[in-house]
Amino acid sequence: MRIYLAVRENLAIFHDFFRTHLLPTQLRHGARLVGRWETEDGRVVAVWEYDDREAYERVQAAVAADPRTRAAQELRRGLPALFSEKDEVFMWSAPSVDELPASVS
């Protein structure tokens, strides 16, 4: 999961840049976008799905080496600030409700 603190006045540019220049390269290398959301406090949250951490690392390495990524980075240098903070958290599935221990009464 990646969480960005967006620059609100540039939010449309942020979304367009992602959709046009970043997402296609990520998908081409096997990333699976679960969804992207905006929060009331100006964050953009993107949740990605990978089979495991090794698959994530393979995809990220391939994306970083892709010439389209370098071209997107060059283009981004000419854009206004899109976000002021970025956080990344690696998550895995928690036990389903059926797998949790019965509550103690």
Image (cartoon, rainbow, N blue to C red):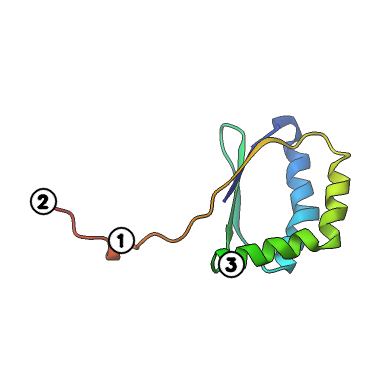
Residue that carries the numbered disc 2 in the rendered image: 105
Looking at the image, residue 79 sits to the left or right of residue 48; the answer is right
- Between 41 and 86, the residue placed more toward the observer is 86
User: Dot 3, crowdedness within 10 Å: few (<14), some or many (≥20)?
Assistant: few
- Element type at mark 2: loop
- Element type at mark 3: helix
Q: What's the amino acid at mark 2?
A: Ser
Residue that carries the numbered disc 1 in the rendered image: 97
| x and y, in percent, of residue 102 in the image | 19, 59
State the CA–CA distance, disc 2 to disc 1: 17 Å
Label located before the other in sequence (3 or 2): 3
Residue at coordinates 80% horizontally, 54% vertically from top-left? 21
- 85 relative to 2, above or below: above
Discs 1/3, front? 3
Residue at coordinates 78% horizontally, 41% vertically from top-left? 13
Looking at the image, residue 59 sits to the left or right of residue 93; the answer is right
Q: Is residue 52 visible?
A: yes
Q: What's the amino acid at mark 1?
A: Val
Residue 26's tag is: none
- Element type at mark 1: helix
Residue that carries the numbered disc 3 in the rendered image: 54
User: Dot 1, crowdedness within 10 Å: few (<14), some or many (≥20)?
Assistant: few
Residue at coordinates 69% horizontally, 60% vertically from top-left? 60
- 37 relative to 43, above or below: below
Label located before the other in sequence (2 or 1): 1
